[in-house]
Amino acid sequence: MKLSKIFIKPSLYFLMLLMVLSFGFRAEAADKENCLMCHKYRQLGRIDEQGRKKNYNVNENIYANTVHRNVPCRDCHTYITRLPHDPVTEEVSCANECHIKPPFAKENFSHRKIINIYNKSVHAIKENDSPDLKLAKPYCKYCHLNPIYTRVSEKRISYEKTLARCFNCHEKKGVTQAYKHVTHRLAHKTSRSPQEIVQLCSKNCHEDVEKMKKFNVSKESVEAVETYNESIHGKAVALGSQQTADCISCHATSAIHDIYKKDNQKATINPANRAKICRQCHRKVNERFIQIDVHSSINNKKPILFFMNLGLRGALYSTIFGLMFLALIETIGRKRDGIKWQIKGGTTWRGKSKREPKN
Amino acid sequence: MPGEPKRLDHPKIVLLIAFVFIIITLAVLGAVLYHLTFSHHGPAILVPFQKKMEEKKRSAILEDVKRQEEYEKHRHFHNVVEYPTLPGKELTVCFICHSDYPHSKNKKVRALLNMHTQFFVCETCHIQEKKGYEIVYKWYNPLEKEPKGPFFGTSYDPETGNLVPVKDQFSRIAPYFKSGDTLLSAIQHQESDLAQDYMRVRDQLTPVQRENVKKKFHVSTKPKGHECKVCHSKKGLLDFRKLGFAENRIVDLEQLNIAGMITKYEKFYIPNLFK
């Protein structure tokens, strides 16, 4: 039964997650056609003809806490025109206009604006790209899962307390959702942690050196993940820092998707724009500061850096191992003299040295 | 000074301080060795050997499966939930060959049939009746002798209207053979002698032999399960009330529109529903 207990534990954690998420509302507004009648069940799925496992479940409690909670299913899944529907072969287009009218806007909501920005960026899939490159470039769903609302830091005032005051005048459901909508976007440039961003850009993509080499990118770009991880930014993020620069911090503006190659005038890392990007965190930024090599690979082509690194490592190892070596020869010497080493009785060395003068 | 008596009465605190210093020294030593050998902050002198070892263990199939799962997560988009799973040996014998998505033939209903595996064990639908026995249906949980519930799917949350999330993630409705007052489980379990024996020797069997043995596992099952309306109708096969379903949930299950929708699927669909 011990093994069984191991498996029960995750189920309890899962239950807690569901309970946290189920604080709230059903996805009724978004599900006019009652798609959840079938799709709410977690085992709705099949193994497809290529042997891939496909799951069609949409967890209603989680969906109701995501940014798309009010978007009717068919605003995205436009190709569903009959019920029951046939196996789906089309992809969702995030540029679709949905039936949500944002506050202070006259038009229905669409991701078109951000897609236009992405389409100009280095990641845009272009007509003359090779098939391999087209496949490798990230599209919306490559980076984005349906984002779940995150809470703002509660250091100053707790989430519940703030909301409790709102409920004095406003309707509970509406104001909770509006509050989450705003506070979800208060942290950093994105709601994801620096660790998540670094993971996102690295995994299966920028860290895959062989893959990157195929795509006519500079040597610096091929090594970017490795050199970032070596840098002070990379090390701080690896150690859990939430303040340190991740990929997005330097490579994009608040539009996040406007990533360009360094020589592009619009690139945030273009020498002309770099000072502005560094100033997001560093107060004293001048001409010399922006020349600091952030993605620096340490090799003998950069002799100063190379020898500095070598010297510092040499100092570290020679200090530690030198001390150990000294302790070792001292121990051997004492033993030769007939002094025994022991812990018992409050002292570590016993006996008389043969070399000591006999009185 | 030589000749002086050695000091043997160190206070206890000195031993403690010495112990702490030894621990710190060992920790520093460990850290420096890690820095020297594996850490990517240092010269990583043992990393090439580590990579070589990993290279030996690499499996193209395993890597592809993992990559596909990652892509699937993003293709799906709607936050796939990792539900807890039962340890292999607690599953019924069917899982040795069939996955948790066992239905694939009937394109119209395969996903819907697979959906039912959250609520039933395979035998609930695919059981072969035995002469002299009545079949009764009960909640079954391999980790609990008498599962008490609440079970998933039996009631709605009155506030949200969603199905109530429950703690019990493993209970399924399962058939039992009833003879007089005794209930006999109709589930073929992986711990049965036949299953254990098969697991032990299956790699030694030829494909034909394996097929023959597989037939043995299917003697008490029938390939085609029940039609939708066998359960999804008033006075259906399953006594929803006895199984602990709430009244409003029973109404939905008995009058399930989807059952009708599927049976009339050939000719019937609702083309104007979305217009």
Image (tube, rainbow, N blue to C red):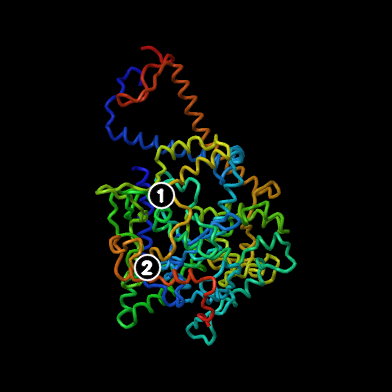
Residue at the location (24% across, 49% down)? B181
Give the chain letter at badge 2: B
Residue tagged 1: B86
Whole-percent x, y for residue A334 in the image: 44, 20
Q: Quadrant of the N terminus of chain A?
A: top left
Relative to B203, A163 lies left or right: left
Question: For the view shown, which residue lies furthest in the left direction?
Answer: B181
From this view, report whether residue A331 is shown above or below residue B83.
above
Do labels 2 and 1 touch, CB within 8 Å? no
Front: mark 2 or 1: 2
Q: Regarding mark 2 in the picture, which secondary structure is present there?
A: loop
Q: Which residue is outermost to the top? A: A358
A304 or A65: nearer the viewer: A65
Please tell me in which quadrant of the rendered image residue A97 appears: bottom right
Q: Which residue is farthest front?
A: B131
Can you give x and y, in whole percent of width and height, for residue B242 in the image? Answer: 28, 61
Residue A146 in view in this figure: yes
Which kind of residue does numbered mark 2 sit on?
A: Ser
Residue B49 located left or right of residue A164: right
Q: Nearer the viewer, residue B20 or B215?
A: B215
Residue that lies at the very extreme toward the bottom in this rendered image: A106
User: CA–CA distance between discs 2 and 1?
Assistant: 31 Å
